Amino acid sequence: MPANPAPIPSGSSVTPVLPAFSPPPSFPPRFVFGAVTAAYQIEGAVREGGRGPSVWDTLARRPGAVLGGDSGEVACDHCHRYPEDVALLRGLGVDSYRFSVSRHDNFEWTYGYSKRFGLGHVDHATQRRTPKDSHHGYRIFIVGSRQSAVGSRRAAPGRPRRPARPARPVPCTPRP
């Protein structure tokens, strides 16, 4: 277990129970150790915040479609347990965490089109994406969280501290 596990935001008493992580000496000094998640695999919260069932949610409900009848309805419950997940990443000494947001435009094909509350607007005729106010608010939250979450630039055990990188704008137009 790390000597000083990272506290979990939100005042919870849960601490990561993981061994301290030191990168092998064969990696370059500025090598970035990171983690990544995909929305469906970790999100959960299928019936919250206006989210409707996705194609995968619908498929997973069909008997025999998925081994064991498992689904992503709860998944890793990251929507509710993200403070613990961030603490686990900090306890591992992870430098970078990237996650995907599945609700960019909230196009869920269940009973036709549903209300769109996502982070961006998609003009389906041109496929042009433009950020909504929610995108800007979420970006401010993420950039502000860099100082207190995984991307805080704290040095992992035995590694020199790196300078913080400036925030880059998140592109909202599809790549060619």
Image: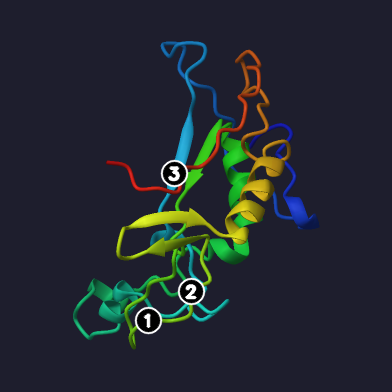
User: Can you say which quadrant of the picture contains the N terminus?
Assistant: top right
The disc placed on residue 36 is 3
Count of picture labels: 3
Q: Residues within 10 Å of mark 2 (few under 14, many from 20)?
A: some
Give the image location of residue 131, x and y in percent.
Answer: 53, 55
User: Residue 72: which quarter of the image?
Assistant: bottom left
Q: Who's the residue at 45% across and 48% down the image?
A: 172
Q: On the image, numbered disc 2 is attached to which residue?
A: 116
In the image, 165 versus 160, the foreground residue is 165
- In the image, farthest residue toward the bottom: 111
Q: Answer left or right for 44 relative to 112.
A: right
Labelled pair 2, 1 in contact (Cβ < 8 Å): yes
Task: Give the residue at mark 1.
Answer: 113
Q: Does the image show residue 166?
A: yes
**Amino acid type, label 1:** Tyr
Mark 3 vs mark 1, CA separation in Å: 29 Å
Q: In this view, which residue lies farthest toward the right? A: 11
Residue 63 screen position, x and y as percent: 22, 86
- Pick whichever, 138 or 68, lies toward us: 138
Three-letter amino acid code at the position of disc 3? Val
Disc 2 to disc 1, C-alpha distance? 8 Å
Which numbered circle lies on residue 34?
Answer: none
The local secondary structure at tag 1 comes to loop
